[in-house]
Amino acid sequence: MKKCWAWVLATGALVSCEGYFGSKTDLSFIDVPTYSVRDIAYVPIQPAFGGFIHPTDLCIGFDELLYVVDEATEEIICLNESGAEQGRITIPGVQTVRQDRQLDLLAIGTHDTTINGVAYSLACLYRIHQIGPGGQYGLPYAHIVHKTIHPFYFKNTFSTSDAQVRFGQVAILASNSAEKNNRYYVSRTGPSSNNANQGPDDAIVLFDRDDTYISPLSVTTSSGLFTNYFQDPKGLVSFAQPPQYTAATGDDFWFTSQDPNQALQVQHISFIETEFGADYRPVIYAGDNSLADRWINQANRFTDPCAMTMAGDNTRYLFVVDRERDSVYQFTASGLEGIPPPPASGETRYTRVSFGGAGNGPMQFIEPSAVAHWKKILYVVDAGNGRISRFKCTLDFE
């Protein structure tokens, strides 16, 4: 009988616990986290940076400032992340700009001169120091310290065809060796197939850190060694991207070709040290239809790829500007187009986030000419609309 009462008391205590500790909380109002691959996209950050007439290029410096080239005013304009101007400098015929790890600017423009009584506007690479006499830093204190004028960096003679040569873009190289750090490549185009026995005008040319000409690059493929591998090269990007402390070392690079006869207009060129010397070799990225429908080395993927960049973060995403299609294309480091789905989504296929189209809407462009990536923000030079448009992937919003 005592056992029976004990059981009843215990049961009553258990029953009464709900009232003692409070009623059970209803958690049905909390949404279970879900991910939809359809929500992955680049969205505009407003407002766009304006005040330009015809911007043609943009780079993120190793000083973590933005440098914009306005072709119409022949100026390089420095902005901070909020778009506030920090200074500007005039460079004749300026088209593109990059910053090396010494914080010098390398700007591609023109140099006007007279040869044998004839006026010419020659391709020129300007080196610009930004440190003033009192140690101040920035474009207000900038001054030109060196000019690399075509063709006088590799020969003393001049032919009229040299006036048709143009430099395209610069790619800075990082190295743990002081002697090799800050060397750089320059893309170059022109009519000659063998200029002064130095190879064709169409080339990627290597310069030392002190602007000394080293050589144009030859590329080795399964078919042999080619001195004329680069056809109408323009866009150029190395793996050394800001910030300084994570800039990748090595001599690999990506380039774009504006030659419509080239099936693969965007390529990765790797640098390999062998027992027989140094080799530059193309790396061809295969597609994977189980993950993505398109990839960077798909034949005839682009029409006019005029520029590209690489994210300096651990994604190493690639972004290619196609001026003819008024569009920007995004690829993973392995060359697949799209962004991998979040781990919790249960999806495996990548979501294509490439965008564009002709117009002046927030997701449209007119003749886009350059692209940069910094702190998860994508910057696109929208030349025809006179602005720098900014975008961010929806996955990167906190």
Image: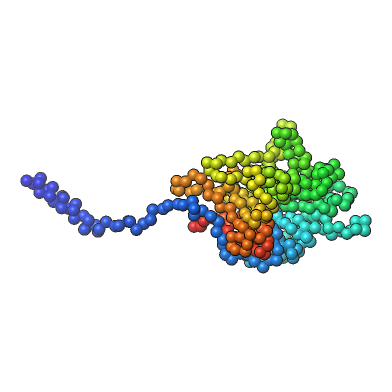
Task: Say above or below: 260 vs 84.
Answer: above
Q: Could you tell me which residue is drawn at 9 percent across and 46 percent down?
A: 4
In percent of the image, x 66 and y 49: which residue is there? 302
Give the image's coloring scheme: rainbow
| Residue 293, visible in the rendered structure | yes
Q: Quadrant of residue 31?
A: bottom left
Please provide percent x and percent y for residue 19: 21, 58
Comparing 231 with 396, the one in front is 231
Residue drawn at 12 percent across, 48 percent down: 6
Give left or right: position of 147 versus 25.
Answer: right
Along the horizontal axis of the image, is 384 left or right of 26? right
Rendering coords of residue 326 (x, y %): 65, 56
Q: Position of residue 260 (x, y in %)?
A: 71, 48
Pick out the residue farthest to the right. 116
> Residue at the spot x=58%, y=47% of the render?
337
| Residue 332 at x, y percent in the picture | 58, 46
Q: Which is more toward the observer, 312 or 129?
A: 312
Q: Residue furthest top?
A: 275
Q: Is residue 217 left or right of residue 7?
A: right
